[in-house]
Amino acid sequence: MATSTYLEAINQALFEEMERDESVFLLGEDIGIYGGAFKVTKGLYKAFGGDRVIDTPISESAIIGSAIGAAITGLRPVAEMQFADFITVGFNQLVANAATLYYRHNIPVPMVVRAPSGGGIRGGPFHSRNPEAWFFHQPGLKIVAPATARDAKGLLKSSIRDNNPVIYFEHKYLYRRVKEELPKEEIVVPLGKANISREGDDVTVITYGAMVFECLDAAKKLFEEHDISAQVIDLRTLQPLDMELILQSVQKTSRVVIVHEASLSGGIGAEIAARISEKAFEYLDAPVKRIASLDTPTPFSPILENEFMPNAEKIYNAILEIMKF
Amino acid sequence: MKKEKLVWMYRMMLLIRRFEERAAQMYGMQKIGGFCHLYIGQEATGVGTVAAMRPEDYLISAYRDHGHILAKGSDPKAVMAELYGKGTGISKGKGGSMHLFDIEKRYLGGHGIVAGQIPLATGVGFAIKYREEDGVVVVSFGEGAVHQGAFHESLNLAKLWKLPVIYLIENNRYGMGTPLERASAVWDLSQKACSYDMARDTVDGMDVLAVYDVMEKAVNRARKESEPTLIEARTYRFRGHSMSDPVHSHYRTREEVEDQKLKDPLKGFQEKLLKDKVLTKEDIKEIESETKRIVLDSVDFAEKSAEPELDSRFEDVYV
């Protein structure tokens, strides 16, 4: 057992997969000699050389498009977007090409786009976004958003081995804040399976990414102060969604709070709420509550950003509110 | 050049012409729906290109793609069935006219968004080089695509990484209804290669042998030196942009279209083959009747094919 940060766990997954399979290669802006904007790929250039850890120009469309071309002819590219926000520049390649090639022609597109996402780092409007909902609306893409170091490692390995295009949202707030003991044995976490981060009976809290920790904090406080037992579900994979686990939990608790850091309207929480109302309406004792970032761009000012984002306190209050029903 | 190759070129150009004429007819009869862009007038560019490639080389193109996939050797039956949206279509009825694809023939689509396929070719070139193979990839697109960022990003990468990619601009003068001179600051499009210090060429896209020569040089450069090339083939489409655009629309004159038809690539090549005694009039007649048979068989196959199974609508979204 050794302690690894979330960031180191990602690095380990890349290293292990590159070592395991020669068809895996990395491409992105400043990922090689520089080691990545956040140093996620540090050491990989030295280990595998410039032919497999490829520094590209600032050309997101060509980065993602080339990855697709390489993937449909037998390689397994892992492309890095320096920030998830910049994925907009390569949007067409992802939604029009990567997402539909298998449907159109039965050609698998085994590629991963790593996208450092999320706020809380005072990044302002263009370096803080959580754009997963744009891609959630496009069938053909898989979407992964780990919260723990173990999942960051295990899900990335599964993403690289998956034959579908996977967008892997790594939360940059967690990079160095999350530290865990990771086993020496290989970790592979299957896509499409949510995890129960905290057991509970009174209310289901559905979340992912950095908000998992805010939800756990809120759950702890609610239990200590009000004897309310919240079951916290970390989705881990957003597409496909683990509806089985969600519905099981809803049937048990009859109350649901959905928390995500992405903006509220049109977010993944809206889809989950709709599915719960369609499939488990009779089990509900209260309206499904969503807690999310505000429907505005991300503000830079720390005071404003703190108000903009969900936090343990907002989640705590929301749960208390729906417990009154 | 060997007679075999010349005859193949002629046969293929004729097949594409007759296939497209029949597709237009079937479209008019509402057997084919959706968007349908015919390759009539541009046959020499596609056929001259494929003639210079090996079967294992890759071709990628845009949505005016019937000619490309046929030239790559795909079964006309499966292509026509795809235009019909039938389950036997080459994309199981899920792609349609603009999204043909045949991995066995190394034809990688058929892409519906202008310039969207260009980075893919760059990646295919990368994969060839990564695996130390000696293949090449040709990506074809219209002149309207050179104004997209994806084109420029790709050229830069291909030159920077020395990839075996040939970027082929099929300049048919109009991006739908907008002529080049109203869309581009420069008229001589292969100049764009200069920005990337890339080899370039310009060719009469109505002359199949000229296209072949230029493409052969580029293919050799790609295969032997792993260097990309940008080629502009100046061609012309005799039909409208798509089936919903009349041949003589208000954006170009009847005189211009008729004038261009004097340079019909198929007619010109036929005359040359007769003059050079590669083919006799009897040969021409025979090829014409064989081609007609192939095309009619493709229509017959499409007509008789079953619609896709309804259950298939949820299939193939994920592997």
Image: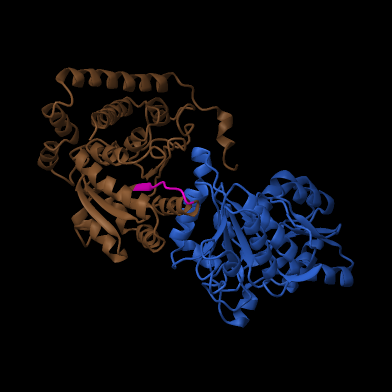
Residue B106, horizontal then vertical, whole percent: 43, 39
Q: Residue at x 47, y 32 (%)?
A: B93
Please state, as top left, top right, bottom left or bottom right, where the C terminus of chain B lies in the image.
top right
Residue A208, horizontal then vertical, whole percent: 70, 61
Q: Quadrant of residue B119?
A: bottom left
Q: Which residues are magenta?
A: B132-139
| Camera-side residue of A224 and B295 | B295
Residue A215, horizontal then vertical, whole percent: 76, 67
Question: In this structure image, what is the colour of chain B?
Answer: brown
How many dots with numbers?
A: 0
Q: Residue at x 49, y 22 (%)?
A: B306
On the picture, is A263 further left or further right than B273?
Answer: right
From what the image shows, is residue B25 above or below residue B163?
A: above
| Camera-side residue of B117 and A22 | A22
On the picture, is A35 further left or further right than B236?
Answer: right
Please state, as top left, top right, bottom left or bottom right, where the N terminus of chain B lies in the image.
top left
Asked if residue B138 lies in the magenta stretch, the reply is yes
